[in-house]
Image: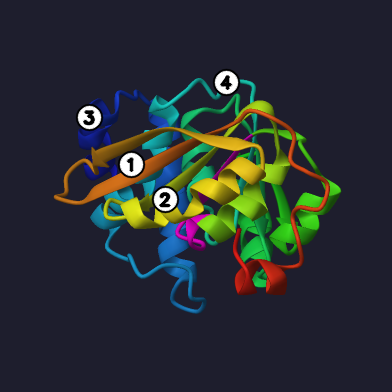
Amino acid sequence: MKQALTEGLPQIRRTLTPQQVDTFCGFGEELIEKNKVMNLTAITEPEQVARLHFLDCMFLLSLQDFRGKTVVDVGCGAGFPGVPMKIAEPELKLTLLDSLNKRIDWLSQTLPVLGVEAECVSARAEEYAALHREQYDNAVSRAVARLNVLSELCLPLVKVGGSFIAMKAVDSDEEISQAARGIGLLGGKVERIVDYTVPGTDAVHRAVVIRKIKKTPGQYPRRFAKIKQSPL
């Protein structure tokens, strides 16, 4: 895990201290061990954890300066992409949000032991968004829902001038096109689409950067059943 992690860092233009590398390895070991009794990840080989979880998620740090910024990871699951971003950029202020209590409980117990500071919240995204409107500089999310659904869960959380970054498959052109109208209604605009190769693999992934250019109308987010039934 350590070798795969350190070998891939130059490709994403990051450097880590030995302590940060050890923290990554500690988190990876905890993830693999917990996955034996809880469904956290389909990726269980240490080298692949380093590449397809850690290096993949750290790529987002190359897109903009996250130092001192508040970031909410919506539908964080086992902590991706938020935890790798926080380990690599400690000045980032992280909130991990997921509706599944047992995932958040695991993160709440594991991260303090590793010295990783994060607010861990168990709540439905649309309910949390309704109560924390435009309180974050950035929202991030990986593999949670289609972009037209995900945008309604994430953009209401972001301050005007901030960004929502969605990690998507490289063949998501149609999905992005279908979400464009809704993104506009929610106060956002697709700023850029960045395709990148995950270090040490042949996998090409995509980051969709959506800038918040105006306030989200008060009627959003709607109840999730409505969002899913009639995406914007």
Callout 1: SS: helix
In the image, is residue 4 above or below residue 191?
below
Q: Which image quarter: residue 106?
A: bottom right
The reply to whether discs 2 and 1 touch (Cβ–Cβ < 8 Å) is no
Residue 97 to residue 42: above or below: above
Q: Which residue is mark 3?
A: 11
**Sequence-earlier tag: 3 or 2:** 3
Q: Which residue is mark 4?
A: 67
Tell me the residue at 66%/37% (across/down): 187
Residue highlighted by disc 2: 176
Q: CA distance from mark 2 to mark 4?
A: 28 Å
Disc 3 packing (10 Å; few <14; some 14–19; many ≥20):
some
**Sequence order check: which comes first, mark 3 or mark 1?**
3
Q: Which residues are magenta?
A: 138-147
* Three-letter code, disc 3: Gln
Q: Which mark is residue 55?
A: 1
